[in-house]
Amino acid sequence: MVARVAVVGGGYAGLAAATELAAAGAAVDVFEASRTLGGRARAVELEGLTLDNGAHILVGAYTETLRLMRLVGAPADGLLRLPLHLEFPGHFRLHAPRLPAPLHLAWALLSARGLSWSDKFAAIAFMRRQRHAAFRLAADTTVGALLAEEPVATRRFLWEPLCLAALNTEPSRASAQVFLNVLRDSLAAGRAASDLLLPARDFSSLFPEPAARFIEAHGGRMMRGTRIECIRHVASGYLVDGHGPYGQAILAVAPQHLPPLVDELPELAPVVAQLQSYAWEPIVTCYLAYPESVRLPQAMLGVIDGTAQWLFDRGHTHGHGGLISAVISASRRHREIDAQRLAAEIHAEVAQIVPNLPAARWTRVIAEKRATFACTPGVSRPLTSTALPGVYLAGDYVAGDYPATIEGAVRSGVAAARLALHQAARSQP
Ligand SMILES: Cc1cc2nc3c(=O)[nH]c(=O)nc-3n(C[C@H](O)[C@H](O)[C@H](O)COP(=O)(O)OP(=O)(O)OC[C@H]3O[C@@H](n4cnc5c(N)ncnc54)[C@H](O)[C@@H]3O)c2cc1C
């Protein structure tokens, strides 16, 4: 039996770490500041409905997230799996058929609407070149520079929207290497990897709540509503406020919440200094509630040159007929306008897709100002292990192949748990 491990943070990273530990027989205590689990991907109550702090999408390449969801017995109907479908009504449509890879992608590109034949061949040639180079760049650059020679249409309808959706950073500033990592594991991988997995339940019940039940069933303890102020190193281990001592601790808080937590651990000062160079990107979600009869032609549609970038119809996915959520990623002009005007602009964009659109019954805007770190070239990300033996970092910002995403957070949590298990096995007599 492994000595008790503390996990601070009950977002996707912390719960992935705790699940992995619990599954291996380790006793684990999870401390989460909020009463709601899930962190930046969590349920919120609005207008008598259980919604999310923001519309999230997953893709088939999220293999670790899917593995852990199965492990904890997450509801099988939690995700709606659809073949890749990108559509900007009236401008562009790409649909991947259920063919084996790489035929699915070739077919999707060749049959795409809104691209000329030379655009389509350029997109195929771009992917071929990247595959040939194993999706590696000799030196990181921006996505804008990577795409400089690509045709305007493929940039505008394909590569740039994918970059913004995955990295939450404008292509002109986003890391080309991280973008290529994402392309390698999604579009260029097996057919299922590029499937869209649209959530059909709120984000707390999708994984965090089943994970908490799994952890408790395996002897773990979930401390909700418990904000940890300080971790201290004592002779017998680590004190987590008044709890412990623990042999090991996994710190799975968002990067901006780490510095006060480790104030009394001078060995972590270099990590705190590293995080000072971070910039943040917002994500704004606007809910617009229409009468139930209002439906988008697809569960997810893109908007070109609009205030919103993506529209989601929760009638298709969650049974919330008439409820549309609009997502605005990265630093767009929503910063300059108030919530009412933002909703009015998005309403006008929905009206271009849905004829005779009635007025919205209500609208709500949720702004996550620090949704993700800005994923720029060469951004310095801390490692899972720290200078303190037994203290590990987990979270979407920790070094890894992926940008700040659910899968990046989950992989980081799993990596931290495995290091903790390895360390515990080594220190056993
Ligand atoms: C609006 C929005 C939309 C997004 N869309 C997508 C998407 O479509 N696809 C995708 O893959 N990703 C998306 N992301 C990113 C994704 O949500 C995050 O990368 C991921 O949830 C981060 O998980 P985490 O566990 O690393 O951090 P967090 O979710 O931030 O978890 C950290 C947890 O630690 C807790 N905590 C902090 N301080 C303390 C303390 N002192 N004591 C105890 N607990 C503490 C917090 O309350 C929180 O629950 C989106 C993010 C946002 C905000």
Image (spheres, grey):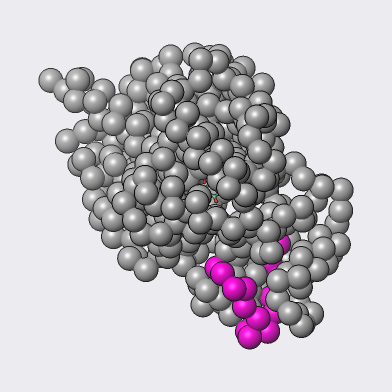
The quadrant in which the C terminus is found is top left
On whether residue 194 falls in the magenta region, the answer is: no
Q: Which residues are magenta?
A: 286-299
Q: Is residue 116 visible?
A: yes
Query: Residue 51 sits in which quadrant?
Result: bottom right
Q: Nearer the viewer, residue 359 or 239?
A: 359
Q: Is residue 272 visible?
A: no
Q: Residue at x 76, y 52 (%)?
A: 305
On the image, the x and y values in percent for residue 172 come to 70, 31
On the image, the x and y values in percent for residue 210 come to 35, 59
Q: Residue at x 81, y 60 (%)?
A: 342
Vertical side of 109 occupied by 268: above or below: above
On the image, the x and y values in percent for residue 224 come to 47, 52
Q: Nearer the viewer, residue 412 or 104?
A: 104
Q: Is residue 313 left or right of residue 152?
A: left
On whether residue 288 falls in the magenta region, the answer is: yes
Q: Main secondary structure of the magenta part?
A: loop
Vertical side of 271 occupied by 43: above or below: below
Q: Residue at x 67, y 29 (%)?
A: 148
